[in-house]
Amino acid sequence: MIKRLQRKFVVIAAVCLLIVEFAIIGGINGVNIYQTNKNADNLLNMIIENDGRFPEFDPMGMKHDKPQDNSNSSSNNTAPPDDKKSDKHRGFNEETKYQTRYFVVYADESGEITKVDTGHVAAVTSSQAIEYGESVLDSGKTSGTSGNYRYKTGDTDKGKIIVFMDCRSDSATKNRFLLVSCAIGVAGYILVCLLIIIFSKRAIRPVVESFEKQKRFITDAGHEIKTPLAIISANTEVLEMVSEPNEWTASIKNQITRLNGLLKELLSLAKMEEEKPALTMADFNISDAVYDAASPFATLAETKGKKLTIDVANGLTYRGDEGAIRQLVSILTENAVKYADEGGEITVKLFTSHSGKETDLEVSNTCKEPPQGDLSKLFDRFYRDDSSRSRTMGEKKGGYGIGLSIAQAIVRSHKSKISCKAENGMMIFTAQLK
């Protein structure tokens, strides 16, 4: 149980860390890609606004859309700054046009290409530029990516202008950033996972100590309670010898029997939940074991007006502790007989799973009012549902509420799974024995 708890702690921490890693790496790469594309679009818009050319920047970083007219000496030599455009083109300067490779395609209103400008790029010829332009015009898109180029269209007085900008450098930068961030993320994830594994024992130490104290208490209390129970039992027998047996002495003996049974099951559960329970693993005929363990309950079911059916596939073998498997069958069958509806049916099945890798033990009983909520809680010790599994006046179903906990411990000690479901008026317990 401790190792299982430690594994759960490590898995949960690792999954949470993985989600955070994905969110961080995805977020920073998303922002990087968005910003890069935004800068490219701003450059394209700037070129489109200036009819396929870069604007001129003065040494102070101001942008001039058109060349200055210096004929009027009485006027200022620089135009007043255009605040709106300065904000829009912030981050660009007089060196930007020398760092940007692009070509321009012009088309008239009918969509016919009239002119191309490839003077700012070396990798594209005029004929190739025409092909790029025709492809964009045919697609009807106003922006996007074509090969290594990001493009954007604009309208002019004479028709359309399409600007293509070489984005190979930006793409390479984005890819490098993605690879580096992923590599750092993976390395960090592995390192943190190793630290989680190393310190997981320390993290669950309080739970381990509490569990060990609980097991110790159950074992010590079980042995300590046996002595007073034996004395009470002996005293009750003396009372019955001195005077005739009566309802009070009978009640005392019944409660002594119940307490002895409870102690036995508690000690058995504590033993099964140890890290390495003392199981004798060997190959045995599980078909015979299941049939032998379930058969005695047929008479018990019949006395309660219920019917027990045993459907066991012949000749199945299994490697495990035969005594523990027999106890598992007895617990599940007794539970089904106990809680089946009046006049109901109980079925015990043993068969090979569809995959052929497991042997499935299925015990079901009719149940018109199945327990509500999470059925996995039925395997919790001392758990009782408020409706169908409760002990009511005049209806003594017995039990201590830990039988299914023992069944679960047996199955887990065989590295297998047990589950419960309610469907079509049936309660079905299935142990998938691997």
Image (cartoon, grey):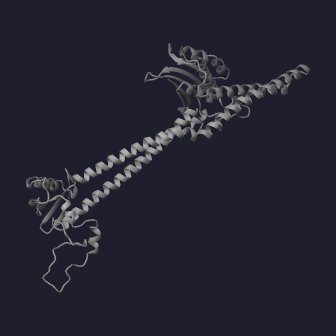
Corner quadrant of residue 41: bottom left
Q: Position of residue 158 (x, y in %)?
A: 12, 67
Point 66% across, 20% down: residue: 300
In the image, residue 30 above or below residue 299? below
Point 36% across, 48% down: residue: 181
Residue sitting nearer the eye, 44 or 99: 99
Q: Residue furthest bottom?
A: 74
In the image, residue 113 above or below residue 309? below
Q: Say which quadrant the N terminus sits in.
A: top right
Point 84% across, 22% down: residue: 234
Left or right: residue 368 versus residue 197 is right
Left or right: residue 121 versus residue 339 is left
Residue sitting nearer the eye, 286 or 397: 286
Residue sitting nearer the eye, 370 or 398: 398
Q: Position of residue 52 (x, y in %)?
A: 15, 64
Q: Position of residue 83 (x, y in %)?
A: 28, 74
Asked if one can make out residue 154 in the rendered structure from this viewpoint, the answer is: yes
Asked if one can make out residue 340 in the rendered structure from this viewpoint, the answer is: no
Residue sitting nearer the eye, 2 or 58: 58
Q: How many marks?
A: 0
In the image, residue 284 above or below residue 415? above
Corner quadrant of residue 242: top right
Left or right: residue 277 versus residue 123 is right
